[in-house]
Amino acid sequence: MPSRHRSVVMFFWLLWTGLSAGLLAGGEQPPQPSVSVTVPSAVPLSVPQLVSRVRNSVVVITVPDRDGREEMLGTGFVVSTNGLIATNLHVVGRGRPISVRTADKQLLPVVAVHASDQMLDLAVLQVDLGPRKLLPLPLGNSQEIEDGARVVVLGNPLGLKHSVVSGVVSGRREIDGREMLQLAVPIEPGNSGGPVLDMLGRVHGVVTAKSLVKQNLGFAVQSKDLKPLLDRPNPVPLERWLTIGQIDRHLWTPLFGARWHQRGGRLLVDGKGKGFGGRSLCLRNGDSPELPYEMAVFVKLDDEQGAAGLVFHADGGQKHYGFYPSAGKLRLSRFDGENVFSWNVLREIASPHYQPEGWNHLKVRVEEKRLLCYVNDHLVIESSDRVFTKGRVGLAKFRDTRAEFKQFAVGDQLAPSRVAPEVADELRALVEKLPGIESLRRTDLTPLTKRAAASVVVLRDKAEVLERQAAELRRVAGDVHTQKVVQELAALTHPKDGVVDLLRAGLLIAQLDEEEVDVDAYVASVERLAQGIRQGLSPEATRGDRLQALDRCMFKENGFHGARFDYYHRANSYLNRVLDDRTGLPITLSVLYIELGRRVGLNIEGVGLPGHFIVRVVGEGEEPQYVDVFNEARHVGPEGLSKLVRQYAGRALRDADLRPSTPKSIVLRMLANLRGLAERSQDNEATLRYLEAIVAIEPEAIAERGARSIIRFNTGRRDAAVADLDWFLEHRPNGLDLDRIREMRDLFSRQPAPR
């Protein structure tokens, strides 16, 4: 696989669909592969003998990366005496110069791509050998090589040229409809295209990918799939190969680097431009349009944090205007030079008419005294800036953005991108009358087919509306569930009799995320554990007897233990999973210990040390006994307590550290743990659930209520976010800047919430 490949994905060449094959110019016949002259060894060779025999037939293949800068490395091998080199298609890519070097570093000029197959990820290069002679490697019968057979792979892993690894054929796997050889061999980027050799020196496969799941596991295209390519080539001269997918230079002029290419009617750009901020332009050739004029394009970004769109009044250098989405907002800028100090953002606005992660229609109307900028036929920016008054038009991209453009147009007055309202109303009425697809007939579609393009837009618009409604309904269903659980949790932590059922509270926390958790069933399972402990105790059992029985039940008989290898997995915070998997965090194991202890006559309290959680067993007239449940209920004395605090907090033990935690504070700490995990993974919906529970349990939790307001707004729950701000204004908590709260409330009320 080429070096610097960020993810090894089988058949990633599908990113390059549209690859066409051509004939040699002037009807010239392609060179025919000559019969291999290398004879396989009659007896199995050692690895050093095999490598010595074949090394000179293995080559290094390099192509520039998408930015045209760093080299991507792969492998190939000679398959005929007249200069045919087999490799992977994804090694050579398309539209990029290809270099081939031998083991002695001699450059072999590539004159054609003799054969290629996207589905097989195979390519055969034709090189000019000149006076040089190279011995081809013989192709074996990959259908006959047995599982467990020893093989050797030559290649250039991670840039380490001409490296050798050995292993075995470990099986065959069907991947994307093709049977591949599975190899128990260390495969790394740079090995792609290398030969898989048996110990007689015969090629049985072409390395194409490493496993994304297991180390020392790779896959290879079988040699039986390479032979048809050699028999029936589809040659393309290199000069034409380099133009496949390239932008039409008669129509466009790219500036400042990046890779501009085309596929069908679309222009695509990737790679970082050489200009400041990754800027790259692609200007349409021809004269500057006369005022007034309009220009438009549909654009789609791979990442909404990127930026790409229209440019106009461009001087062919550093100066131009630009209208483009940037980090989810729409921006009109004037570029007066080569860096940010000479760039001027004239206007930037968030618009509800912009559709993130989809196609957006950008249009600029350029008049003598004003600039009008539209997104999806809605005017969003108007400017009277007239520093530049003429120049070329085109496209731009910034940062590491990958973008697609389609339907670029310039004219006096362009048609709207959307269907006219009256036509849309008429078509929507027809759509409403359509039967379900089960009963749909061709005649039902006839009225829509007469205006097919507009009908397709209306149908897809309705589908998007229904999909948004369905997504919102699923979120509302989740909110209903959350509210029900939160109410139960709040009631549990404020009991009338003063006794908090920590077990049930912990299970309700799990139920926030896993609706199917059967709280009563898990409570019953804990009751059964407690019943087993009680049955083994005599009526005269002391506190020590009960404690020993509890420890034996949890850690000896049932195998509960602290989570050490996946400590931060959310499951460790769910009491149902602790009971199922017998592993958990210090606090969840301690809750179970407390609740089991209570059921067998022990008074156990939680102790929230900084960074760790333990318990203490208390009895009338007896010294508290501290227990580190996470570490198999190890009993901890004064010295051990000091060591724990120093280990987790880096300071000396304080008296306050040993105060018992209230049941409510334990529940809040469990929720805070989950909140931290959700925030780390940027899971806003989960974060909101935990904040809802925290605020319900502790209404005076000012910081959590403020955070909840922001997340409510960011997840589209605007009115609920405003309600939190109103609570601050009504209760006026100390230390809070109420003017800032009012400003935030005004902003939330005026601005549409994100969807």
Image: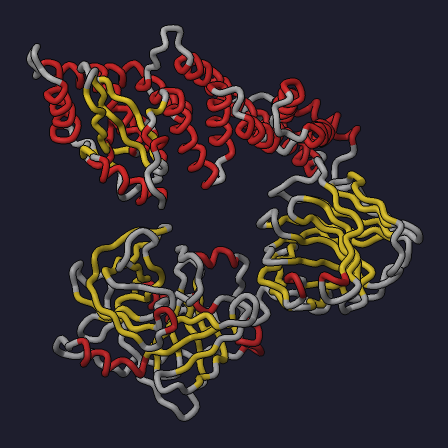
Question: Which quarter of the rendering shows the N terminus?
Answer: bottom left
Asked whether 471 or 562 is in front, the reply is 562
Q: Residue at x 61, y 65 (%)?
A: 258
Question: Where the C terminus falls, by quadrant?
Answer: top right
- Nearer the observer, 177 or 729: 729
| Residue at the image point whose x is 76% and y is 69% from the top | 317
Image coordinates of residue 78 in percent, x first then y, are 35, 78
* Percent of width and height locating residue 138: 27, 76
Indicate the colouring scheme.
secondary structure
- Quarter of the image where one finds residue 147: bottom left
Q: Choose top left, top right, bottom left or bottom right for residue 150.
A: bottom left
Question: Is residue 743 visible to us here?
Answer: yes
Corner quadrant of residue 577: top left
View extreme (bottom): residue: 131
Q: Residue at x 45, y 41 (%)?
A: 680
| For residue 353, above or below residue 500 | below
Q: Position of residue 319 (x, y in %)?
A: 79, 65
From what the image shows, is residue 461 above or below residue 501?
below
Residue at the outermost right position: 368
Outermost residue toward the top in this view: 496
Residue 694 image point, x, y percent: 47, 24
Q: Residue at image x 42%, y 12%?
A: 494
